[in-house]
Amino acid sequence: MAELLEAAMLMCFGLSWPMNAYKGYRAETAVGTSWQFIALITLGYFAGIAAKFASGNINWVLAVYFINVVCIAANWLVYFRNRRLDAQREIVNASVELKERRASRERAIRAAEEGYIAGVRTAQQR
């Protein structure tokens, strides 16, 4: 009975990880994703696997642990992919902002030059 309950717990966790990975994949951002949380869960799975080996209680539930490790590995892959996408977006946004600043500066210079020239013309006409 203990094995069934342990397997049920692992199945509940195991089913939530693919859904979480899919959600993260669709979001295309690592914002709001806690790598510390994923790391703690990963550590917990490895502790559970180690406990199985240390106790000599190696049974079919161990396979469920390994399936969960594969699912959490998918979450790690999505997390790092999303971090890369966030960094790329940041570079693009910085580039756009720089172009906008340069264009604004050029407009200000042109306006100042035109104002100066208009002022000179006005002074010459007097």
Image (spheres, rainbow, N blue to C red):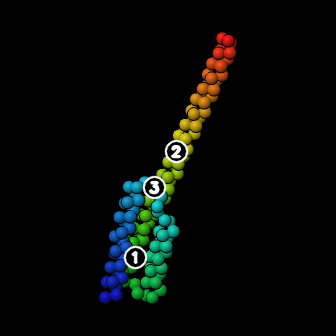
Dot 1: within a 10 Å radius of its alpha carbon, few (fewer than 14), some, or many (20 or more) residues? many
Give the residue pinned by disc 3: 29
Q: Is residue 15 left or right of residue 120?
A: left
Q: Secondary structure at mark 2?
A: helix
Q: Which mark is residue 114?
A: none
Dot 2: within a 10 Å radius of its alpha carbon, few (fewer than 14), some, or many (20 or more) residues? few
Dot 3: within a 10 Å radius of its alpha carbon, few (fewer than 14), some, or many (20 or more) residues? many
Compared with residue 81, is residue 56 higher up or lower down, i.e. above or below? below
Compared with residue 45, is residue 3 higher up or lower down, i.e. above or below? below
Compared with residue 110, is residue 91 higher up or lower down, i.e. above or below? below
The structure residue drawn at horizontal position 53% and vertical position 48%, both measured from the top left corner, is 90
Gap in angstroms between the C-alphas marked 3 and 2: 15 Å
Foreground of the two, 60 or 91 = 91
- Asked if residue 63 can be seen in this view, the reply is no
Gap in angstroms between the C-alphas marked 3 and 1: 28 Å
Question: In which quadrant will I find the C terminus?
Answer: top right
Q: Secondary structure at mark 3?
A: loop
* Residue 113 drawn at (x, y percent): 64, 23
Give the residue pinned by disc 2: 93
Foreground of the two, 44 or 60 = 44
Q: Earlier in the sequence, mark 3 or mark 2?
A: 3
Amino acid bearing label 3: Thr
Name the mark nearer the viewer: 1 or 2: 2
Give the residue pinned by disc 1: 65
Amino acid bearing label 1: Tyr
Foreground of the two, 59 or 79 = 79
Question: Which quarter of the figure has residue 8?
Answer: bottom left
Q: Secondary structure at mark 1?
A: helix
Amino acid bearing label 2: Asn
Q: Is residue 67 left or right of residue 96?
A: left
The structure residue drawn at horizontal position 41% and vertical position 59%, both measured from the top left corner, is 24
User: Residue lying furthest top in this view?
Assistant: 125
